[in-house]
Amino acid sequence: MIKAALIFNNHGKPRLTKFFTYYTEEMQQQIIRETFLLLSKREDSVCNFLEGGTLIGGSDFRLVYRHYATLYFVFCVDSSESELGILDLIQVFVETLDRCFENVCELDLIFHMDKVHYILQEIVMGGMVVETNQTEILTHIEAQQRIEKQEAGIFKPSGRMGGAPARALSAAKSMAPNVNLPKLADLQNISLPSFKKL
Amino acid sequence: MKNVEQMIIGSPNGHSPTFKKFIKDIADSKTKYEESLVMQSEVESLKKEIKTPYANSAVQHERLVKLIYIHMLGYDATFGVIDAIKFAQQSSLFYKRVGYLVSSLLLNPGREESLLLCCSLQKDLASDSVVEQSMALTAICQLMGKDTISAFLPTIIKKLSHPKEIIRKKAVDVLYQFLCEMPEQTHDDRYMKALCDPDAGVMISALPIYLKLCKEQPAKYRHMNKAFTDILIQIVEGRLHNSFNYHTFPAPWAQVYLLQIFQFLGSNDKLLSEEMSHVLHLVIARASGKMTTPQASDAAVAVLYQVCQTILSIYPNQDLILLVTRKIDEFLNSSSNKIYLGLQLLEKLCERQPSIGGAFIPQVYQYISHQCTMIQGAAIKVLRVGVSSPTLSDATRVLLELLSDPSCSKELEDLCCTTLAEIGRKHAPSPAWYVELLLKILGIRSSTPSSLTVTPSSLSSPSPILNTLINYCTTTVDSEVKALIQTAAQQNDDVNSQKSWLSIWALGRYDPDFERATVWVNKLESLSENQIKWLLDSLVVLVTRLGALPKPLFSLLEPYTNSPSPIIRQLAIELVNLSNLPNVTSLFNSQADMLSILIEQLSTTPDSGLENTTAHKQFLAKFRKRANFPTEKVEFHHDIQEEGPKQRVNVPTKDGTPAPTATWVSYHEHIPEEASANEKPEPPL
């Protein structure tokens, strides 16, 4: 089972933290710090697995990570998960982000943390891998985006919450899954140095 | 770091100025303190804003995203929980999604607020919209605990027949969560329905459930072996839709799950192991074909690794094991990730097939000095199980080299020491060889900088190796061992070294006179508290062997009877009393067994200290009567007991240090056999 998915940058600033098992808030912060300390000492040439810190549960747990230009993507997993499988899952996650944000960089994560969470939700659910196919993941994300856009058209920004005509809304929702819209139009790309992969 | 100005200019227009400012302020803060100021002011204003009616949907949305930020950076965002829940209850999907997201980050199944979401979750599950249903299923995974699960269960089970595969798949995942929360929920029909789903994606998501079930009760799921074999054959032969392929490799994650299931089904089961051997052959052939290509995905190698693990776990099949050994060789000659996995496999191989695994041992030495600590650790573990008599001397040499490397981390050092002690104990050609090895370890450890720059606390806990050595010496009667220890003890008078402990210990057990005792007693001032304890204990033993302390020593030690430390006081009083006793050696030679029985009995009485003295007195009276023990001598021990029976029995002591060990054991050593008592005292009251 996946215990946590963490993203932080080279300075240890968290960019995304998601715990699939309950830890208290203090504990979560300590785990993030401990994980960063463990990983920052490692060179890129050594292996991508590490015994978990004492806080997350010690030697029964593994930290599986990938280090891209400025970011660390870390999954804390228990012994039942295949290390290499998780390593490629991180790759799937990052590639999906890259497709969604077109040349994803640290800033995309900072400004669209909610979207990053939604993407992660489509890949990992409650600590289990739900989907590993990039196209499938994107389809689900698109379906959500589409409905949002349709809603935005219904509700003009000034509208009070919940005031939208319920029938129109549900009509929009139920037709959504069958329509095939082309591209993710509303995901802007920030033209900054691209996010190099190893 | 990127320029913050650039960040703001470059930020998409979807964000309001306040949100941009918030991000900028966080990025600008140079210290944790500055960040906390930004956060505090943001939390204050959010608390107010969040109460006011919403003006603009984007602003409302951003407030919740800010909550995620506050939470992520470790500040309390729980004030927003109720608002997040309100969002989740909206009919707008835009709000609902962020509402569920923030709730699932801030809440956990244990919190009462999560109950507030039950109603809207039920409503969303009943919705016509696929997106809404799938959102609800995701939220249930994160938010619902034991108490609320049963309320959702019927709905979730119905979802297994939903026309959309994504809903069925997520429903299966929720069922898995339920199974983890309530392991008694083993209703096979549901899981079977999921496993037999027409969509392969749903079938694959049911595999973790079966993995869990098979792990816990392999016997109950024996009949499923055929089904799993069929599934795996179909996957390997590429019958799944190519959307399940990952870098042209068919469904690697599903293959790993299936192979893990086989691992549990086949262990200790010859019949099933034979049944699955065909498919394992197939998998290993396909996967190793992939490994040789340069663009091999990690997931494909993961399958190869898992099939090797499975082969090593099931009933041994020599053909397959031979294949595994070849794969291990490939793993070991590859990149660092694969080396690590190869070592894991090798460890298992050495455990299961020591004769085959042993051949790899010389190949492992190079990884002991690898730059990756994980690989070093894995290599040491291989040696721990894989070393046998022929490889012993090389392996110990390599490990001792690592131990003397000053850059070696504390964890590795410990692992290295325990491994050396273990392989030495198992395969040493003679007791003297083993003792020599332990002495070498002690010597190296005390010369490494990490041990030299010891703080008082780390000095107070001598290594487990020392304990191993002392325990071994007390139980082994070997003249060579004795000679080795004596030489080692005499060479070492440096109070800061690990060997000094050994030296102190040995003077009580082996010294023929008070000469070295005098040397150490003269150094009393420079000894740590724990070393003083050890020294006093050793002197007690020495006195029982050689008789009363010489006068100068006696006067130096007497002040310790008023030491603030109860243990030192106790030991010092014992020492003084013993030393004052006439004919102490003869007493211990004739009655030692009686005394040790007495002490043993006392030490097994409830450890409640002085309150127990009445009980002790009664017991002693009884003991005296039955053993015809001279009153005077018993009184002496009675005194000790009153002084603090607790400390005598406390091994290890409160501060975690191993207290002087084996004092009473060593009394036994000096008893002539014919002197042992015939009568046993009654059990303590």
Image: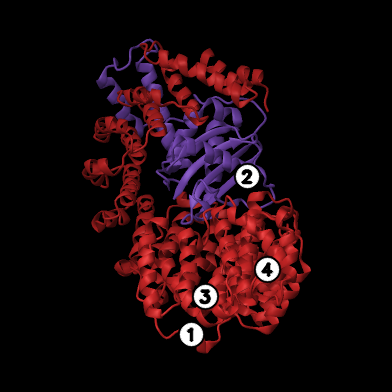
Q: How many neighbours does mark 1 have within 10 angstroms: few (below 14), some (14-19), or many (20 or more)?
A: some
Callout 3: chain: B
Q: Measure the alpha-carbon separation of dots 3 and 1.
A: 47 Å
Mark 2 element type:
helix
Report the front residue among A40 and B389. B389
For label 4, the SS is: helix
Q: Is residue A4 left or right of residue B54?
A: right
Give the alpha-carbon distance from disc 4 to disc 2, as whole Å.
25 Å
Give the amino acid type for the residue marked by disc 1 in the picture: Ser
Which of marks 1 and 4 precedes in the sequence?
4
Q: Quadrant of residue B545?
A: bottom right
Task: Return the residue nearer the eye: A32 or B675.
Answer: B675
Q: Which chain is red?
A: B
Disc 4 sits on a residue from what chain?
A: B
How many C-alpha atoms fall within 10 Å of the one at disc 3: few (<14), some, or many (≥20)?
some
Quick check: B192 left or right of B556? left
Task: Using the rendered image, report if marks 1 and 2 lie on a common chain.
Answer: no
Residue B61 image position (x, y, % from top left) = 42, 20
Q: Which mark is residue B352?
A: 3
Q: Residue at x 56, y 36 (%)?
A: A98
Quarter holding residue A172:
top left
CA distance for labels 4 and 1: 52 Å
Q: Which residue is mark 4?
A: B364
Disc 4 versus disc 1: nearer the observer: 1
The dot on residue B676 is: 1
Q: Colour of chain A?
A: purple
